[in-house]
Image (cartoon, rainbow, N blue to C red):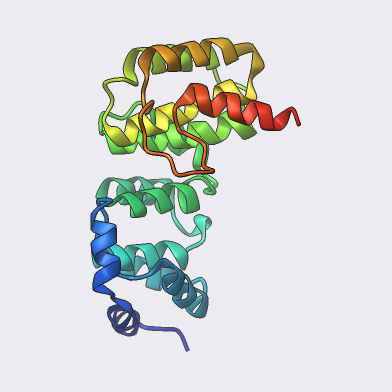
Amino acid sequence: MSMTLDEAMAELAALEDPKVLAVNQRHGDEHAVNLTKLRALAKRIKANPALARELWQTDDAAARLLAILVSRPKDWTADELDAMLRQARTPKVLDWLTNYLAQKSPDAEELRRAWFADEDPKVAAAGWALTGVRIVKDPDGLDLTSLLDVIESRMREAPDRLQWAMNTCLAQIGITHPGHRARAIEIGERLEVLKDYPTAPNCTSPYAPVWIDEMVRRQAR
């Protein structure tokens, strides 16, 4: 028997933890549910497009994360994913929507093109995130020189989320495309975006020149 919306919301409420909420709020998120427990709940529910739509409409952050987990990319049209991205408010929901649904959607390229130049920074950030995937996995047809031009002119002043996505594209160009590596490193050095970003021990800095050098070094082993 499929879980109802009321049952799913009751389970989410039972999983709420004030300590989890306090940690998440420091990162701009609103959910109070441990993500491992949320994934376990989704595994019990399994794919359920109808419930996913109901969960999304609650406007609750944890419910929207659960909606994404009990969805399949093919369950949503491009128009629906576009509307959902514009409705999403929190970083985790935006990340999961982009990575779990939009990136794997049959309409991923259509969405990438539409979002890439959108005036809403959070929408544009999703377009840049999808572009980053293409830079690594399917670069044919991308104009990497033009991408570097845009990054060079816009990244330093971009809002945080968009800046992060653009910086990721910069690093991925430098890592995976040797012909553009020197310019990618030079842009990163000159703009100094994320140069002082706190990085845990044994983790690679998101500062593009360091990121590029480290990944290229690993590939050469």
- Residue 148 position (above or below residue 47): above
Q: Residue at x 47, y 34 (%)?
A: 205
Q: Residue furthest front?
A: 201
Query: Based on the displayed image, in which of its 4 quarters is residue 191 positioned?
Result: top left
Which is more toward the observer, 8 or 37? 37
Q: Quadrant of the C terminus?
A: top right
- Note whether residue 195 is visible: yes
Residue 78: image location, x then y, percent: 42, 46
- Residue 74 position (above or below residue 47): above
Q: Residue at x 37, y 38 (%)?
A: 198
- Residue 148 position (above or below residue 92): above
Q: Residue at x 56, y 25 (%)?
A: 212
Query: Based on the displayed image, in which of its 4 quarters is residue 200 positioned?
Result: top left
Q: Is residue 188 left or right of residue 31?
A: right
Residue 67: image location, x then y, percent: 39, 66
- Note whether residue 114 is visible: no
Q: Is residue 66 left or right of residue 201?
A: left
Which is more toward the observer, 91 or 124? 91
